[in-house]
Image (tube, grey):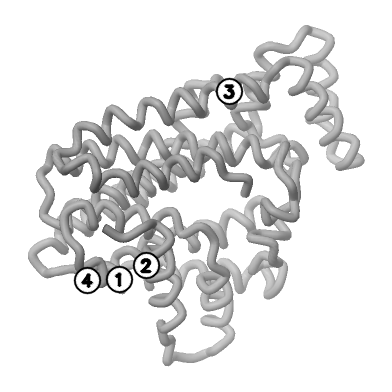
Amino acid sequence: MYSWEELRNKVNNFISELKYAREPLALYAPIIYTLEQGGKRVRPVALLMAYNLYKEDVEQVLYPAVAMETYHNYTLLHDDVMDKADVRRGMPTVWKKWGENEAILSGDTMFVLAYEFLSHVDSDKLPAALALFNEMAKEIGEGQQYDMEFEKRNDVKEEEYINMIRLKTSVLIANCMKLGAMLAGASKEDAENLYRYGVTVGLAFQLQDDLLDVYGDPKVFGKKIGGDICCNKKTFLLINALEQASPEQRREMEQWMAQEEFDADAKIKYFTSLYNTLGIRRQCEEKIATLFAECDSYLDAVSVPAERKSVIKSFADSLLNRIH
């Protein structure tokens, strides 16, 4: 069994060796810039770990693993345009560095490249892989639409939010694990349990991201703290604060949220203080811990020896304890 660090290194080395022998260069420069920035590589490593539960030749599935990473980064290019995010992974976002039109076009090309990389799977498994990928891509688009719609609402419920992040974030991690199992010839039951595991880990991962956006160290987190607060993004923290605030606190929150021009530092300070007063940080941490505990039941049901599952378990633990 490979460690997740070893698998991440394999992904990084594979990406660094990819060649784009096409022009215009300006189309591919943002793609290279994005993919070679690194990051945690959660999604491709998840696919490789699931495959590695059954087989050792993980090099055979690096193309589909990188297909998932390429698709993920395509969504980030477009998300950053929609959110007007300036920084990602400690670097200027593509739209900030090259322009909005360039980010959209390069993102579109990354979407096509993801299909090209995915086509390298064995021909007998390609139809199932494409069906999984297409359903996943539709769900992620649905999640993004919900996310945008939620920005215009102050009555979003926690259950709605959980479903939105399941679609927008979790299904990608879940399908990486399911695809890895499928490509390794795992049983349908194992593939489904790994899918459920990935969904639950993905939910916890996104809630941790919500938490870090408020309480993380920007030097470590890789992007500005408080971005979700400034754009009134309906996160677990904001939704529960709106639900639990007193009438006076809610009026103050809505006044801040209605302002088109504001002092960003003051707004972030206000909401952070309110979250602390209401105990929202603790509630989010408890929700994350509950989700990670739920993961174990799905992993336990996967029919491989426990020692082979230890890498996946340690990977999940590292996500729970991450600071970036």
- Considering only order in the chain, which callout, 3 or 2, is on the residue closer to the N terminus? 2
Q: CA distance from mark 2 to mark 1?
A: 5 Å
* Residue 66, label in figure: 2
Q: Could you tell me the amino acid type at mark 2?
A: Val
Closer to us: 254 or 230:
230
Q: Could you tell me the amino acid type at mark 3?
A: Val
Q: On screen, 201 above or below 41?
A: above
* Residue 63, label in figure: 1
Q: On screen, 10 above or below 75?
A: below
Q: Which quadrant of the figure has residue 37? A: bottom right
Circle 4: element type: helix
Circle 2: element type: helix
Q: At 48% from the left edge and 21% from the top edge, which residue is drawn?
A: 159
**Mark 4 or 3: the one toward you:** 4
- Considering only order in the chain, which callout, 3 or 4, is on the residue closer to the N terminus? 4
Residue labelled with disc 4: 60
Q: At 16% from the left edge and 63% from the top edge, which residue is drawn?
A: 126
Where does residue 297 sit, x and y in percent of width and height? 28, 27
Q: At 27% from the left edge and 36% from the top edge, which residue is drawn?
A: 299
- Considering only order in the chain, which callout, 3 or 1, is on the residue closer to the N terminus? 1
Circle 3: element type: loop
Where does residue 302 sit, x and y in percent of width and height? 19, 38
Residue labelled with disc 3: 156
Q: At 30% from the left edge and 71% from the top edge, which residue is drawn?
A: 63
- Answer few, some or many: residues within 10 Å of disc 4's Cα (few below 14, many 20 plus, some between 14 and 19): some
Image marks 4 and 3: residues in contact by CB distance under 8 Å: no
Q: Could you tell me the amino acid type at mark 4?
A: Gln
Where does residue 21 sit, x and y in percent of width and height? 42, 92
Closer to us: 166 or 258:
166
Name the residue at the top extreme. Answer: 247
- Considering only order in the chain, which callout, 4 or 2, is on the residue closer to the N terminus? 4
